[in-house]
Amino acid sequence: MSTIVVCGFLLVACFVGASGAFSVLEFVFGPKLTQHGSVRPKHYEVTPAQILVESQGFRFESHDVTSKTGHILTLHRIPHAKEKIPLGNNQRRPVALFQHGLLAASDSWLFRGEDADLPYILSNAGYDVWLSNMRGNIYSNKHVKYDSKRDEQYWNFGLEEVAKYDLPEIIDYVLTIAKQQSLYFLGHSVGSTVGLMLCAMRPEYNAKIKAHLALAPLVYANHPISFTHKLVFSPMTFLSSVLRQEKIHGIFPRRKYFSNMMEMICKDGMPTQPLCVAAIFLMVGADYPQFNTSSIPTLLNYYPSGTSMYLALHTIQLYVSGKFASLDYGNSTLNLNQYNNTIPPSYNISKVSHPVLLLYGTGDNFVTESDIKYLAKKLPNAVEIPIPYKNFNHMDFMWGIDAKNLLYERLLMLMKKYR
């Protein structure tokens, strides 16, 4: 899905030029930091996530958690089924914590409806569902000290900071509110990656995860990198330095004009729609039967949702290098200051002892079967689980038309095994 974001922005940028209130770089990637007073992030009286959940008839809650670094993280909760299931004495609903992938948000899991989206399905099955939002996205963009619209310090984070500082606070908060000792962790792509990073760095959190349902986790990419991926990722290191010089540190935020322009390009009936679909499939793997092309305009109301340049670079580094390691800042002095070593350290994945269910699609171009098999050999307590459909791709885990039958119902059975 990231490909259509990049390609779409570049396409519409051709019509903008460098004139006007902001530059082409701002139009494509995101706004510059401003020094003209404090400009707080957009505030919703009623958030899109709340509207989606309540429109399906479920109860919605929003909770704020403050990370050790001062970033304020917003969690969304669906505490019980639409038709509340009675509990016996001393019984509590098992907790399922979702962590989204790159450039997504909690509502990326919520817009298709009760019969299609996994959080609703788990809620109706009796789970206490929580959805985390990574720092820097549309919901988690506040800080106790820094202003995300003004202060560069806010944006100095990659995947490691999410894993090391945010997830422990999130997990502890959720377990405290739910009065539970452990939970199910469901991560998609780099959402799963940060869960593995957490337990590699802080093994005591293994005991707090009943089972980790890893949906196409990006950890070790040892398959040959495609031409398309090289074309997209190769310029990113240079581009990131240009963006930082231009004071652009948060990238691909959720913006209405982007959704409107992409709808114009990608909606049904437009001759350019096949280009949109082809751009997506070049990145994640082709699966026409599982992709509802009519949903692209709706999907783009909820994706992308913003992140930091460093987090995007860390994701690309994991993919291109094939190493499960800390972010390389590309400067020996910066690495030395950060890690006391000029070479970024690798994560000790052997310390991840909780059960990890490695779910993968054989049609996924981004996280392949060979990547999963390599990862499984590194983990002490892993199970490989292919999706029984040959073209299942990286995007189908969230938005595949038949994801409920191919995957979600199976997840329910797997989760019961680890109670």
Image (tube, rainbow, N blue to C red):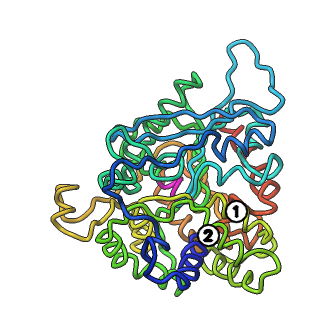
Residue 167 in percent (x, y) is at 45, 42
Which segment did they paint magenta? 189-193
Quarter assignment of residue 71: top left
Q: Residue furthest front?
A: 20
Q: Residue furthest top?
A: 89
Question: Which residue position holds label 2?
Answer: 1
Look at label 1 and name its amino acid: Leu
Image vertical order of residue 134 relative to residue 221, above or below: above
Q: Secondary structure at mark 2?
A: loop
Residue at screen point 41% across, 59% down: 308
Look at label 2 and name its amino acid: Met
Quadrant of the snapshot with the N terminus: bottom right
Residue sitting nearer the eye, 294 or 358: 294
Q: Residues within 10 Å of mark 1 (few under 14, many from 20)?
A: some
Question: Which residue position holds label 1?
Answer: 299
Residue 138 in percent (x, y) is at 53, 51
Residue at screen point 71% across, 71% down: 263
Q: Secondary structure at mark 1?
A: helix
Residue 69 in percent (x, y) is at 33, 41
Image vertical order of residue 210 relative to residue 194, above or below: above
Residue sitting nearer the eye, 144 or 220: 144
Task: Mark yes or no: residue 376 visible.
Answer: no
Residue sitting nearer the eye, 139 or 224: 139
